Image (cartoon, rainbow, N blue to C red):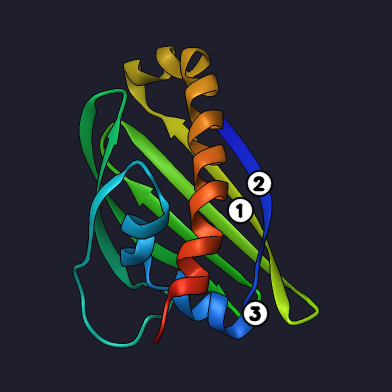
Amino acid sequence: MISVERVMVVRRPLAEVVAYLEDFAHTVEWDPGTVRCVRIDEGPVRPGARWRNTSRFRGRTTELQYELAVHETARLVFVGENKTVTALDDLRFAEEGTATRLTYRASLTFKGLARLVTPFLRGEFEQLADKVVARLPAAAEAWRP
């Protein structure tokens, strides 16, 4: 498994940051690996809501189906899966004055033979996490409901 964690500050109130990030389709705005992300069910965003995410990593395109597993006032957890990997995005929020401190933890668990590449991908995954930190706060701050 590869896990990375980053902490960033978003200059918006906690409820607004959660409202932005609970719609996983917004990953196209803040995750540099995401090429496309669309909701594949309907209704309010709540646990069980699902998205189809297309990402590009190391020149390859892959598709994962994500589901919102946890939706709390100060925490969101998304689980994405396909036949070669399970991805987990765990977002935790805390008020910091009028801003929000976001702790972003992402993990990848490879399946089958794909597990053999895990040690070789850590550096690239760390770089990707750094790019998320560079993009996510600005995207959340620019969002208007």
Q: CA distance from mark 3 to mark 2?
A: 17 Å
The residue under the point 37% across, 27% down is 111
Q: Which residue is denoted by mark 1 in the rendering?
A: 104
Q: Decide which of 45, 132 is in the foreground and name it.
A: 132
Q: Earlier in the sequence, mark 3 or mark 2?
A: 2
SS label for mark 1 = strand
Disc 2 marks a residue whose amino acid type is Arg
- Left or right: residue 15 versus residue 140 is right
* 52 vs 3: above or below: below
Q: Which residue is denoted by mark 2 in the rendering?
A: 6
Asked if the residues shown at circle 3 and circle 2 are in contact, with their CB atoms under 8 angstroms apart, the answer is no
- Left or right: residue 115 versus residue 39 is right
Q: Position of residue 25 (x, y in %)?
A: 31, 65
Q: Residues within 10 Å of mark 3 (few under 14, many from 20)?
A: many
Q: Which residue is denoted by mark 3 in the rendering?
A: 14
Disc 3 marks a residue whose amino acid type is Leu
